[in-house]
Image (spheres, helix red, strand yellow):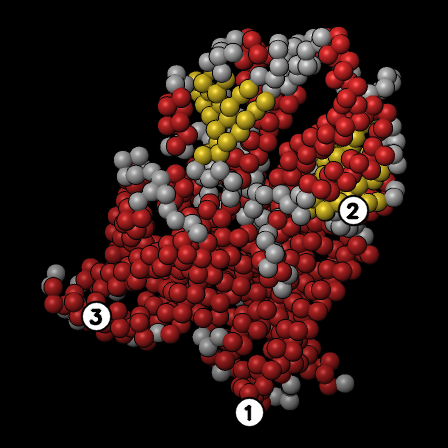
Amino acid sequence: MSFISNVRAVAYKEATVVRHDKALIGMVVAQPIIMLLLVGYALSYEPANVPWAVLDRDDSPLSRRFLQDVQATGYFLPWQQVASYDEGYAKLASGEVLAFVQIPEDFERNAYRSRPDVQVLLDGADPVSSARVGAYLAQIGQHFETVRDARARAGPGEGLVVRQEFRFNRTLDDSRFFLAALAGILLTNLCMSATSLGLVAERENGTYEQMLALPTRPLEIVIGKLVPYVALSYVVLAIATLGAGIGFGLWPRGSVLALLAVTLPFVLASLSVGVFVSAMARTSAQAVFITVFAILPSMVLSGVMFPYQLMPDGVREIGGVLPLRWYQIALRRITLRGAGIEEVVAPALMLTAIFFVLLVLIRFRMKPRLA
Amino acid sequence: MSGRRLRTLLQREARATLRDPFTMVSLVAVPLAALLVFGFVLSTEVKGLALGVLDASHSAASRRFASALAANGTFAVRPYESRDALDRALVAGEVSAGLVVPPDFARGIAAEAAAAPAELVVIYDGGETVLAGNAEGFLRALVSDTVAQVTARERGAQEAARRARLELPPTPTGVDVRVRALFNPELDGTRFMVSGTFGFVLSFLTTVITAISIVKERLDGTFEQLQVTPATSFEILLGKIVPLGVVFTLDVVVMMLAGGFLLGVWPVGSALFFVIVSAFYVLTSLAIGIVISATSATAAEAVQKTVMLSIPLIQLSGFAFPLRNMPRGVQWLAELFPATHYIRISHAIYLRGRGPVDLLPELGILLAFAAGLVLFAIRAMERRA
């Protein structure tokens, strides 16, 4: 059948091009390593080194114990003692501290009668950190034993306790969350940028016309051009998975077969986005430009960096058009939660659907240029 | 330096920029799209999450507990019949958190004496770490409050009577931590992201458009023509920078208006001060664009280099991830990007309403970057000539 042999011929030609593209090879090797280090070590929403100011009007053993309890959580830097409300407020307003804790004069005295108060002002300019720091402080307060001897106050009411359990990631370590999606980030970068330049460059160099003069159909050209990148993508997947495993001890908990299987429709869909951009753009500079603006929303809207579950309706659905949305869902299910094939069938089907829609669009877009 | 020559160069650049439809579209579309996309993605508010509830107690108390949780409206409560079904739902990502009501729940509520207290288990999906981190404090408080509410109803009356009879004070336990956020009481992510988007758009778009424009001129040969005219390198550079700088500064104003009217985010501090600071930052980005173009052979290469530079821009500049959460070494590295300083200043002006005096050190750093990069750009252009 000529379809297969035509695709194979175009694939061979494209593989030769890829092999000689030093910049691309560099990207395939360097980018995973840079991103692995960034994601594994640097990126986190979990508050750390939080600077805080304290105005302790009570200055009693109890208030100091409360402050030490806060310090002991490990999220905070040593606190800065301030002498007045204004001083603390100024530190907060200048961004010098994230939280300003005020303990009232009657803190210890109140502890024996009712629940004493602590006031906390947070810097709303950093909403992510502030929301979490606020929740931590409230929790410390809730469990703070104002009266040391627990049995003295353990009257009725202790019949029920609430226990928290973090499944799949016991310490709620952000880096595991980002590392699990690392392959998705890398493959999006690779697939979209690799193919977006391809067609435009061929058109600019005139080799596209040469190919059209061959007995190949446009669809065969497109598929043939994708094949080498699919192979390259699996290399990147292997680098990302082994890197996360060896470097950070995060091995896929679920089925590796499912991981390999769901990667194929994702890679095809992402490559098609690139081809589509390439078919739209007039110059290669435009192509790269458009690609960048296809990659960035992928990172932001897909849920790789920000939880998509919390995005407002409408925005969440727009993100559903992006291949990366479904791939990161599958990746995290397999890597973190130990999912098998059946749990990733739904995302895989979505990816396949996106691929076919793009293929049809590309087919329409390329047609007039053949006339 | 001749005023007439410079004016001609300025006119030329302005016309070239205004005539190119692709540039014009990206100048308007990219900032607007970035504002709308970034403005909505970051949310610290926990709502509408699916919460799987396994009621092993099957008692009136536990049913009341579940319906009280559902009535709160923050979580969409889904019932599960067995621990297995709940676990599978967590693996498949159907629910973001699980709650196991123990068989002895009713006894626990009634506070009957027992060897061990009944244990209510809250399970978070660590696979969605960020989400779980945001939901943790919230769900815990909600569960405790709801338990207290149900408990109060179950034994409220008789307990209060007993306590009154024995003249016991209410059991002292815990500390009320009253949390209030300044500048942004709802801890709304939109304000934070909008103010950071300026840094993102200006760094990225400015550099790309400058780089494309210069490389294109070099490929078309018009750059060489410029260089054989009596114009000096500095004049040619100014001729490039000034019109683009004005255009991008206007872009800042457009973004401020769009952020204000579409997303309701206006700067707390002085808008004029913000525009002036932004103009200096535009200068920095333009200079980077010129350096990139001087070292690139094709337009595509120039854009690719910009993209490589823009990876750290999102991850390390404090745009999305707070810098203080990072290891010390990475924090030092981040200080080397002008974008880090500009984004810090944007947050300070936009969210906290800071003025020039408070921001003096950061402004100094930004100015130093601008001066250094412009000098470097001139050198790069001369070397290229």
Instruction: Answer whether residue A304 is visible to the viewer in this image.
Output: no
Q: Which residue is mark 1?
A: A371
On whether disc 1 and disc 3 are found on a single subunit, the reply is no
Tell me which residue sits at (57%, 16%) in the image. A116
Q: Residue A315 occupies which quadrant of the picture?
A: bottom right
Task: Name the side, left or right, on which A256 lies relative to A362.
Answer: right
| Label drawn at residue B11 | 3
Q: Residue furthest bottom?
A: A371
Q: Nearer the viewer, residue A364 or B109?
A: B109
Eye-nearest disc, 2 or 1? 2
Q: Nearer the viewer, residue B331 or B156?
A: B156
Q: Is residue A355 above or below residue A315?
A: below
| Label drawn at residue B78 | 2
Q: Quadrant of the N terminus of chain A?
A: bottom right
Task: Name the side, left or right, on which A99 lies relative to A264.
Answer: left
Q: Chain of mark 1?
A: A
